[in-house]
Image: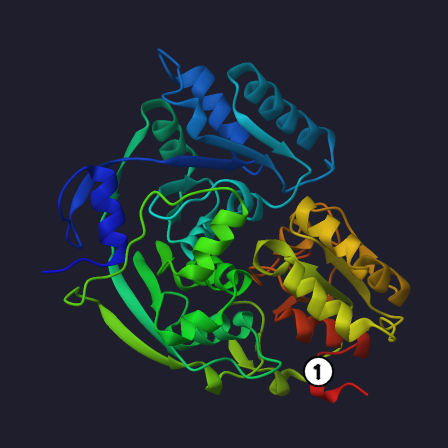
C-alpha cells in the first residue's frame, strides 16, 4: 500500500520505511520556530523545570519577534527582552522587527521534506514548500528543543485535486475560504490537507502559502502541496535546496477526496465570528466598515500589495475608514517601496505600518473598539480577535478588502466606480 506526502515525511523523520494513519512514531524534528507570543513561557520552563537544561541542536532553532512590534507595554518589553537575551546567550537564530514569523521562515529557512514544529498554529503554511509544518504548544516545543525529537500520531489525509484556473479577480484567499466553508471548521480535524492536480500549477508561491496557511482553520494538523518547478524555483531564488521532494503514491489511501474546479470559485467573505461562516462577497455588500487591514502571514506579500495598490491608484480611502497596510516582511516592504506601492497607499490615505502581525493579532496596532467593524486579510475573525469582544471582523481577499476601504462598506471590485 502506498503512502501520502504526510506519511512519507513522517516516515523519513522517524527513520522507518513506512507509516500508516493512527501509528505513533518518535521523530527527529528538522526545525523549531517560536515567536514572542509564547517563547517567554518556554524560557521559564527551561530555566525552572529542567534538571539538566540544554539545547539538543541550536542550529534547528529560529526565534522571531513579530506579534507586538514595537512592544506595546512594559510587560511586553520584558517578555521580549527575556527572549532576546536567551537567544543571544545560546546562539539561537533570532529575528526582530523583520516581519511575520511564517513569512520569514518561508523566505529564509523552510525546505521541502522537512518536519517542522512551530509554536504558532499557522505553521501549516510551510506545506506550500512541501514541508510538514505543524503548530505545537510550549511543552511540546520545549521537549523537542531539549531532545531534538518528539512524537507524532500519523494523520489521515484529505486530498484536494485542483483543476483549471481561478477567474480574473478571484484569488487563492477566496479558494481556501470556499474550501473551509465547504468542509467546516472541524472538517479536517487532525488530518493533513493535501493539494495537487493540474490546477496547482496555475498558483504562485504566494497563492500556495495563503492556501496552506489557513488550513488550520479547518482543524488540519498540517497542509501539504506537491513540490513542482514553481516551488523549486522559489527555493533556489532564496539559496536553498530541498531535503526531499515527495508526492503521494498512486495507491495511497485518502480519508476523502475533493475535486475543485478553480474556475468556479468566486470572491468570498467570512462573516463574524467563525472562519467557516462564509458567503459570496456580494451577499455582504453594503455592510459599513470602520477599518480595513491588508497584511498578515496570509495576505501580506508583494503580490497582495500590488493588488491593493492597483485598485487604490487614483482613488482615496473612504474618509471614515482607517486602512492599515502592513507588509509581511522587510523584504516585502523594500520591494513595495522600490515599486512605488507604498507611496500609492500613503497618497490615497492608507496607513503604512512596519512589518509585523498588526491587527490580525489584535494586540498592538489598529485595535478596534466596541461595535466597530473590520474587514481583514488576517487569519481569524473570532469574537474579540481584533479588539473589543463586541466588535466584528470579516475576512476577505486583498482585492475585496481594498475595494471596501475605498467604498466605506463591504463591496466587490466590480462595484467600484
Q: Which residue is mark 1?
A: 413
The local crowd at label 1, few if under 14, some if 14 to 19, many if 20 or more residues have their Cα within 10 Å, is some
Residue drawn where x is 77% and y is 68% of the image:
309
SS under mark 1: helix
Which image quarter: residue 366? bottom right
Is residue 374 something that shows in the picture?
no
The answer to whether residue 403 is left or right of residue 43 is right
Q: Residue 148: where, in percent of width, then height?
A: 33, 27
Q: Identify which residue, 197 or 68, lies in the foreground.
A: 197
Question: What residue is shown at x 34% (from left), y 28% (from top)?
Answer: 143
Q: Is residue 262 visible?
A: yes
Picture layout, residue 378 above or below residue 328: below
Q: Which image quadrant for residue 189?
A: bottom left
Coloring applied to the structure: rainbow
Horizontal side, residue 331 vs residue 324: left or right: left
Residue at 58% from the left image edge and 63% from the top image edge:
381
Q: Is residue 98 left or right of residue 220?
A: right
Provide residue 285's location: percent of width, then percent of height.
Answer: 68, 85
Amino acid at each position: 500500500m502506498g503512502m501520502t506526502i504526510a506519511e512519507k515525511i513522517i516516515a523519513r523523520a522517524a527513520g522507518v520505511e513506512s507509516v500508516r494513519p493512527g501509528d505513533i512514531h518518535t521523530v527527529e524534528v528538522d526545525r523549531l520556530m517560536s515567536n514572542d507570543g509564547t517563547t517567554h513561557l518556554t524560557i521559564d520552563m527551561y530555566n525552572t523545570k529542567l534538571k539538566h537544561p540544554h539545547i539538543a541542536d541550536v542550529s534547528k532553532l529560529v526565534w522571531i519577534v513579530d506579534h507586538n512590534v514595537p512592544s506595546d507595554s512594559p510587560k511586553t518589553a520584558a517578555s521580549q527582552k527575556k527572549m532576546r537575551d536567551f537567544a543571544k546567550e545560546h546562539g539561537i537564530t533570532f529575528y526582530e522587527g523583520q516581519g511575520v514569523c511564517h513569512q520569514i521562515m518561508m523566505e529564509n529557512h523552510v525546505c521541502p521534506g522537512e518536519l517542522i514544529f512551530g509554536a504558532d498554529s499557522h505553521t501549516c503554511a510551510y506545506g506550500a514548500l512541501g514541508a510538514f509544518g505543524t503548530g505545537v504548544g510550549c511543552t511540546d516545543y520545549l521537549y523537542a528543543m531539549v531532545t531534538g525529537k518528539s512524537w507524532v500520531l500519523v494523520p489521515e489525509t484529505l486530498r484536494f485535486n485542483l483543476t483549471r484556473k481561478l477567474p480574473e479577480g478571484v484569488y487563492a484567499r477566496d479558494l481556501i475560504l470556499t474550501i473551509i466553508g465547504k468542509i467546516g471548521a472541524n472538517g479536517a480535524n487532525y488530518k493533513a490537507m493535501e493539494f495537487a492536480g493540474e490546477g496547482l500549477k496555475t498558483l504562485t508561491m504566494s497563492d500556495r502559502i495563503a492556501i496552506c496557511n489557513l488550513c488550520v482553520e479547518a482543524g488540519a494538523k498540517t497542509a501539504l502541496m506537491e513540490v513542482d518547478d514553481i516551488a523549486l524555483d522559489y527555493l533556489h531564488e532564496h539559496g536553498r535546496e530541498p531535503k526531499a521532494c515527495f508526492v503521494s503514491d498512486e495507491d495511497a489511501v485518502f480519508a476523502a477526496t475533493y475535486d475543485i474546479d478553480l474556475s468556479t470559485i468566486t470572491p468570498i467573505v467570512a462573516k463574524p465570528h467563525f472562519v467557516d461562516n462564509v458567503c459570496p462577497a456580494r451577499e455582504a455588500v453594503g455592510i459599513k466598515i470602520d477599518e480595513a487591514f491588508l497584511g498578515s502571514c496570509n495576505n501580506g506579500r508583494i503580490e497582495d500589495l500590488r493588488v491593493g495598490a492597483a485598485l487604490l491608484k487614483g482613488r482615496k480611502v473612504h474618509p471614515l475608514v482607517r486602512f492599515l497596510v502592513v507588509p509581511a516582511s522587510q523584504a516585502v516592504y523594500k520591494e513595495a517601496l522600490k515599486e512605488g506601492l507604498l507611496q500609492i497607499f500613503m497618497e490615497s490615505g492608507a496607513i503604512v505600518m512596519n512589518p509585523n502581525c498588526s491587527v490580525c493579532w489584535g494586540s498592538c496596532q489598529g485595535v478596534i473598539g466596541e461595535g466597530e467593524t473590520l474587514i481583514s486579510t488576517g487569519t481569524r475573525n473570532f469574537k474579540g480577535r481584533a479588539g473589543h469582544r463586541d466588535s466584528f471582523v470579516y475576512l476577505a481577499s486583498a482585492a475585496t478588502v481594498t475595494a471596501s476601504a475605498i467604498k466605506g462598506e463591504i463591496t466587490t471590485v466590480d462595484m467600484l466606480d
